[in-house]
Amino acid sequence: MRTRATSLLAAVIICGTSHAAYALTTRLSDGQQSLEIEWPEAEGWVIGHQQDVGHTAIVEVVRPPETVHSWTQLGTMLMFRDDAGRWMGAHLDETVSRLFESARARAREARLDTRPERLSGPFDSRIFVIVGNQYPDGTSETQVQLLVQGTNALYNIQRTQRTPGLDRQTVEAWVHFLQTARVVSGQAP
């Protein structure tokens, strides 16, 4: 499989000023519109993997010394382009259900918590939590996710921790973090 140039995939900005609140900005762009989020500086996120193949683009961020193959926390941004078919055109609630069913198919126990929070602006969005316990490899994980229906792509940001649940304060902090994502029109830099 041939990988597309990553200039369409992600723009990574490292802030060099001591007063910057964020050290890493990740952006996924379909060429006309982008979804971007700034990862908290104090948490030390770095790009672990990025790829743009066919209809899907992905950026995964980790906190050193962890890697995308061995992590306790993982940040993931995904973009499914318009012609990806199975994601576009579906109502976001249906897409949330599909993602939950996928987790439930792999975990002995899974639960879904949909949140009332949304991104501000004209784009439809959903924030939700999936807790998956007892995957076949013996791990458990909790994901706090944001789905955004852009004009030409479906975007997903996930913050995942390998634990069978998160305390309420952590979930609220992660939801607040996801609400800082923004859709930007125009060509990515």
Image: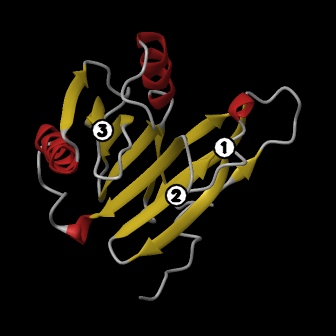
Residue 160: percent from left, percent from top: 44, 39
Q: Earlier in the sequence, mark 3 or mark 1?
A: 1
Distance of label 2 from label 1 (alpha carbons): 14 Å
Q: Along the horizontal axis of the image, is 155 left or right of 23?
A: left
Mark 2 and mark 3 residues within 8 Å of each other at the beta carbon: no
Q: Position of residue 47 (x, y in %)?
A: 64, 55
Residue 63 is marked as: 1
Image quadrant in which you'd find residue 112: top left
Task: Give me the residue at 89% from left, 30% from top.
Answer: 18
Which residue position holds label 2?
A: 59
- Could you tell me the amino acid type at mark 3? Phe
> Which residue extends farthest front?
138
Residue at 15 percent of width and 63 percent of height: 86
Q: Residue furthest bottom?
A: 2
Query: Counting other residues with Cα less than 10 Å from the Cα at mark 1, is it few (<14), some (14-19), or many (20 or more)?
Result: some
- Secondary structure type for disc 3: loop
Mark 2 or 3, nearer chain start: 2
- Residue type, label 1: Arg
Quadrant the N terminus occupies: bottom left
Front in this rendered view, residue 28 or 70: 70
Residue tagged by mark 3? Answer: 123
Q: Is residue 131 above or below residue 12?
A: above
